[in-house]
Amino acid sequence: MTAAALDPDPHGTPAAPAATTGTTPQPVVLISGISGSGKSVAINALEDAGYFCVDNLPPELLPELIRLEGRNPHRRLAIAADVRTASSLPKLLPMIDTLRREGTPVLMIFLDSRTETLVRRFSETRRRHPLSSEDDGQGGQSRSALGEAIEREREMLSPLREASTVIDTSDLRPTQLRSWIRQLVGAAHSSLTLVFESFAFKHGVPRDADLVFDLRVLPNPHYVRELRALNGRDAGVIEFLQAQPEVAEMLAQIEGFLARWLPAYEQDQRSYLTVAIGCTGGQHRSVYSVEQLAARFRDRIPTLVRHRELEAKEAAQH
């Protein structure tokens, strides 16, 4: 569906409140982010999940689209907005606040990546960044011009990023991103969802992390030959780590910290709190700890589990 297919109400009729069906209304999903960070993958994942998706919709048309779609309470709606509608971006956040006050829940997801990753992606695909005007003579753009365009885009989209749930796609395969998007929209009715994510420090701290805990001080199963090829969900690694008093103490302290401060994060009206648990390789200690912590909190609060490096490794094997 193109933006031209929509006719905005000349009288500025506000969006209709979400239909009342006796259950919590399905939120409108807004996908935004830095160019090259995976918005197309995210939108395709939502289309496959049954969402009606509109890409590059001018923000001025959003209330009218929601009003029209409100006639069909069973249709789920996803919108992609990015720097291509730069002149209208300042209107987007106030418009979303108005929609929420009128009863339309909006789930905002912002996709981000490290600049060097984005430069590599643009270089590989030979696509031009929407803010870049320089040509390298071969149909592309120079790395310096591309880097400048990305940083300018970051600045323009920073208010949107601050208001959204962020996913760092720097080290994600498309299959992982599709899975994480489906997880987020599946948990969107909760007031606060706790996300535990394991990662490897050698590949960088996730940009979407709200809290980061470093487990590299704990005994490492990697140095036990029989455990090296296993991961933190395997019985041998679990048995090894459960026998280490420092591991139990670390997990108890992380659990205590989260239990103490979760109410404050809920009062801050967050939708998601991402707790990143890191070790050296992202295979043993961090994976085990994420599984343990998720099990401790699952009965208290909606909880999601991600294993950045482990999922990437498993996807590569298939």
Image (tube, grey):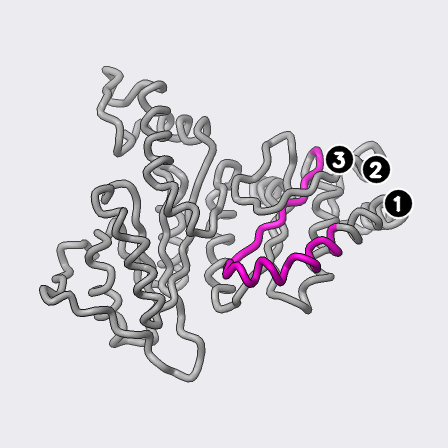
Residue at the outermost top position: 137
Are discs 3 and 2 less than 8 Å apart at CB? no
Identified at 57% across, 47% down, the residue is 210
The picture places residue 248, in percent across and down from the top left corner, at: 84, 50
Task: Look at the image and say whether residue 255 sits in the magenta stretch.
Answer: yes
For badge 3, the amino acid type reads Arg
Q: Which residue is mark 3?
A: 216
User: Could you tell me if residue 236 is visible in this image?
Assistant: no
For badge 2, the amino acid type reads Pro
Residue at the outermost left position: 10
Q: Secondary structure at mark 3?
A: loop
The quarter holding residue 209 reads top right
Mark 3, Cα crowd under 10 Å, few <14 / some 14-19 / many 20+, is some
Are discs 1 and 2 less than 8 Å apart at CB? yes
The one nearer the camera, 278 or 287, is 278
The picture places residue 233, in percent across and down from the top left corner, at: 74, 50
For badge 1, the amino acid type reads Gln
Identified at 72% across, 55% down, the residue is 293
**Segment tinted magenta in the rendering:** 254-280
On residue 6, which mark appears?
none
Q: Which residue is mark 1?
A: 244
Q: Which residue is mark 2?
A: 219
Q: Quadrant of the C terminus?
A: top right
Q: Quadrant of the N terminus?
A: bottom left
Task: Look at the image and say whether residue 267 sits in the magenta stretch.
Answer: yes
The one nearer the camera, 284 or 89, is 89
